[in-house]
Amino acid sequence: MTQSLRESMHLVSDPANLQSSVEEVFNLMLGVDCQIVTQTTQDPREAETITAVVGFGGLLSGACVFRSGSSTALKIAARLTGMEFTEMDDTVKDAIGEICNMLAGAWKGKVPDLSANCGLSIPAVITGSSYNIHVQAPEFRLHHTYRFDDAAFEVTIICDGLQ
């Protein structure tokens, strides 16, 4: 068992692991293919966004953050549950929290020492507008914006401590 992830930093911080995790979760759970885009997620006409955060604890501390506009959240929840949604209710919030949880688990599973020595928190879900999540001086940050159909979302892995 590895007591430090420092020698595996190139694996832990590899952006390909994030991309692979998004592809796996969205293809398996939603039946969609996602593409990386260079645009921002939130449509300027959308006033409300949703953010889910799943924390990492153990040899790596940090978080997996999923963020989208409300229209994308409704589409994701509909694909995940097989139901239609017209508002951001508790089921939609739970669905987005679960997507974030699956992304965090898939990402940490890409590095065996990380998988075995890093736990996940339960998802926290935030809705609203004009908010930012700030982490002071992270060890590394992986961030991509993705699109499927006309829906866009962001996934960020933030590492604020690595043993």
Image (cartoon, rainbow, N blue to C red):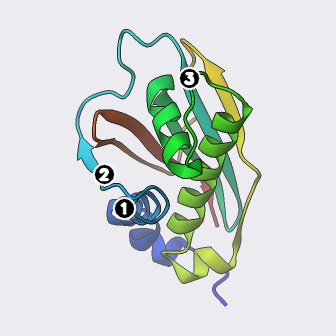
Residue 68 visible? The answer is yes
User: Could you say which is closer to the camera, residue 75 or residue 1?
Assistant: 75
Q: Residue at x 67, y 90 (%)?
A: 1
**At numbered mark 3, what does the secondary structure look like: helix, strand or loop?**
loop
Image location (x, y in percent) of residue 138: 53, 44
Residue 140 located left or right of residue 43? right
**Dot 2 crowding, Cα within 10 Å, few <14, some 14–19, many 20+:** many
Occupied quadrant, residue 9 = bottom left
Q: Label 1 sits on what residue type?
A: Glu
**At numbered mark 1, what does the secondary structure look like: helix, strand or loop?**
helix
Occupied quadrant, residue 13 = bottom left
Q: Residue at x 60, y 74 (%)?
A: 114
User: What residue is pinned by disc 1?
Assistant: 23
User: Could you say which is closer to the camera, residue 82 or residue 48?
Assistant: 82
Residues under labels 1 and 3: Cα distance? 26 Å
User: What residue is pinned by disc 3?
Assistant: 86
Q: Residue at x 41, y 59 (%)?
A: 18
In this view, 74 is above or below 53: above
View extreme (bottom): residue: 1
User: What residue is pinned by disc 2?
Assistant: 34
Q: Counting residues from the N terminus, which is met first, the one under dot 1 or under dot 2? A: 1
Q: Residue at x 63, y 44 (%)?
A: 95
Image location (x, y in percent) of residue 127: 64, 23
Q: Counting residues from the N terminus, which is met first, the one under dot 1 or under dot 3? A: 1
